[in-house]
Image: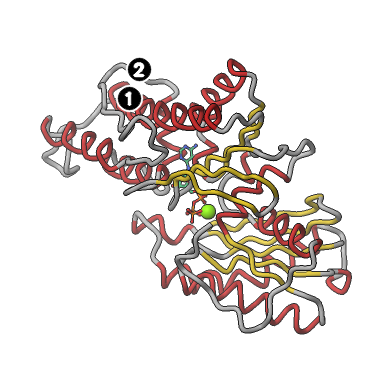
Amino acid sequence: MIVLGIETSCDETSAAILIDGKVKSNIISSQIIHQRYGGVVPELASRAHQKLIIPVVEKAIIDAGINKTQIDGVAVTYGPGLIGALLVGLNFAKAFAYGLKIPFVGVNHMQAHLYSNFIGKEKPEYPFVCLIVSGGHTQLVLVKEPFNHELLGETLDDAAGEAYDKVAKMLGLGFPGGPQLDKLAQIGDSNFVKFPRSYLSEDSFEFSFSGIKTSVLYWLKNRGYYPINENSKKLDVQQLSDLCASFQAAVVDVLVEKTMRAVEKYRVKHLTVSGGVSANSELRKRLLAAGNKSGVKVFIPDLEYCTDNGAMVAVVGWMLLERGVTSNYEIGAVANLSI
Ligand SMILES: Nc1ncnc2c1ncn2[C@@H]1O[C@H](COP(=O)(O)OP(=O)(O)OP(=O)(O)O)[C@@H](O)[C@H]1O
Ligand SMILES: [Mg+2]
């Protein structure tokens, strides 16, 4: 079965071709227009998707070495995400499928992140725990069997990626700041500042990252480093790296501890991690080490499948189409769709 996967929920226009469950192409066009605003501007995202959707899909088809008439089904993200951005991909997918008289299926973006670990050769075995850490979500999910998910807990305020991006902005790093902050943290001292770890109650699988973010803000403000202007003090590279490492340690400590607690409580042998923040070097290292110590196999996607991509949408679409699940043309975009 050949599946075309389309993703336009935020600021990446992406399309992928999957042949019998294997990724043959995965084209990701990240919209750079948002960098100058320090965050995603929804209207600009929709317009950029409109410009990019056709060339991105065409390239995915060409790179996979197929003809579009060979495609058996189309999978597309229909939520959660920015409504205008979702509508571009969803309407394109409907038209594409209608034109070729093939089925199409709407895919939940969070399920796409969740199953991104099924892209690799070795697949996780059920039941497993999945930590989803992205720009808009931080969730611990117990996956009992395919499409049987129990949400164990999620963030009460900022998502992990959001906290990374907001702290990076305070530090004057670019957008999205997560990758840049991660890079600096690698050469920093995580004991420089002891930022608070928010574990909430002992048995809670919920998260809160706004406190850590505010602590960084006050640390900078109280010492004259923020707001950044011609009068503010400037951090040197070592101080900046030490601050990044200290912030990162606070976030990763909480993510790792709660995840391993869930693994222990539900006695699973496999753990998966996905979403943009699963690209984080420290989180990957620490979870692999924790898994090793407790005899749990940890699955983390290759970097290209951590942030938004069409391949993860195609994988879920393929799983649904194989089960005979399709969507009808009345399906609409759902901005706040839950997992
Ligand atoms: N190496 C890294 N370290 C920390 N954060 C990172 C890293 N790489 C990417 N990120 C963060 O990942 C986020 C983007 O991930 P993703 O594309 O999964 O999110 P999203 O699609 O915007 O949100 P959602 O999936 O919740 O709708 C950004 O916040 C970005 O800063
Ligand atoms: Mg995403």
Q: Secondary structure at mark 2?
A: loop
Q: Relative to 244, does residue 40 appear above or below in the rendering?
A: below
Please provide percent x and percent y for residue 262: 51, 33
Please provide percent x and percent y for residue 213: 27, 39
Colour option used: secondary structure
Report the quarter where the N terminus lies: bottom right
Q: Earlier in the sequence, mark 1 or mark 2?
A: 2
Q: Residue 329 lies in what quarter of the image?
A: bottom right
Q: Relative to 27, does residue 152 appear above or below in the rendering?
A: above
The residue shown at (59%, 58%) is 29
Q: Crowding at label 1, few (<14), some or many (≥20) Cα neighbours within 10 Å?
A: many
Q: How many marks?
A: 2
Mark 2 beta carbon near ligand 1 (under 8 Å): no
The disc labelled 1 sits on which kind of residue?
Ser
Q: Crowding at label 2, few (<14), some or many (≥20) Cα neighbours within 10 Å?
A: some
Q: Is 23 positioned to the left or the right of 128 in the image?
A: right
The residue shown at (70%, 51%) is 146
Report the residue marked by disc 1.
Answer: 246
Q: Is 162 positioned to the left or the right of 65 in the image?
A: left
Q: Residue 189 lies in what quarter of the image?
A: top left
Please provide percent x and percent y for residue 294: 59, 18
Marks 1 and 2 close (CB-CB < 8 Å): yes
Q: Residue 237 lies in what quarter of the image?
A: top left
Q: Relative to 332, does residue 72 appear above or below in the rendering?
A: above
Pick the residue in front: 248 or 36.
248
Q: Is 244 positioned to the left or the right of 270 in the image?
A: left
| Alpha carbon separation for disc pair 1 and 2 | 7 Å
Please provide percent x and percent y for residue 280: 50, 34
- Which label number is shown at residue 189? 2
The disc labelled 2 sits on which kind of residue?
Asp
The residue shown at (40%, 55%) is 35
